[in-house]
Amino acid sequence: MKIAVCIKQVPTREWHPRLNEAGTWIREQDASYELNEPDAYALEEALRLREKHGGEVVVCAAGPARVQQVIREALARGADRALHVEHDSLASADAAVTSAALASAMAEERFDLVLTGLQSDDQGHAQVGVMLAERLQIPHSTIIMDVQVEQNRLRVKRELEGGWFQWISMPLPALLTIQSGINQLRYATLKGIMAAKKKEIRKLALPSGLAASQTIVALAVPTRSKKTELISGATPEAAKELVRRLREEARAL
């Protein structure tokens, strides 16, 4: 099987966001970065499928030059090679632009299966995978908890609401967005890190005319505040009002 895994570099969870002077994006020079966690589960699932069925795993990314950090990490974990659409504007690109950039790099490869994480830890839109499938003109399914390959078809388990699951059958090629926790992640070994240095990372230019379809007008960092309210009245009535607020407003009961 020829499997593609789309990965993204995101700010680490421990980093406290700082906005740029215009208030339209983060101060990238101050941030520390890591591999998007849902994408790590997609990569692990691809590696397991390759171990069962043979083939190759190709990681695909769209972003500035710094994205090579997570590309090398993915190669060290076991991916065979990588495609990188490199452009500074892709750091804050929306799902439409990101999916278009990835599709331009992946179309000629004709992958049997494309895996993405369910969503990114920074923007969390959960849209890139679905848009990418439409651009590649292949069927897709989301929130996948199990993947089984049966000849030229897939049997996948989807997570639904309320603790329900759904098994469906799909033709290949296809795209799946992988839910975190589907498997146990592996980490790069010293041997893998050394091998990654020799693996191919093919750089591709952003297609001409591909500009942001949406512009970030302003961002704001959430702030914490405290507010004290005194409930007046006799004790029985005040107690009833307190219970009501805890139940209906704070939802603590």
Image (cartoon, rainbow, N blue to C red):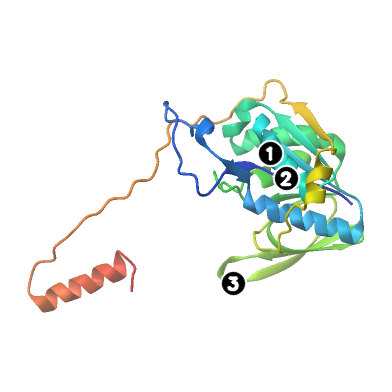
Q: Position of residue 53 (x, y in %)?
A: 91, 59
Residue reaching furthest to the bottom? 236
Amino acid type at circle 1 is Gln
Amino acid type at circle 3 is Gly
Camera-near label (3 vs 1) is 1
Which mark is drawn over residue 163?
3
Residue 232 image-quadrant placement: bottom left
Query: Residue at 53% of width from left, 31% of height from top?
Result: 29
Q: Position of residue 80 (x, y in %)?
A: 85, 45
Query: Residue at 25% of width from left, 54% of height from top?
Result: 226
Q: Position of residue 24 (x, y in %)?
A: 46, 30
Which mark is drawn over residue 141?
none
Left or right for 169, reference 246: right
Separation of disc 1 and disc 2 at Cα? 6 Å
Left or right for 13, reference 132: left
User: Answer yes or no: do the residues labelled 1 and 2 have beta carbons within 8 Å?
Assistant: yes
Which mark is drawn over residue 73?
2
Q: Secondary structure under badge 3? A: helix
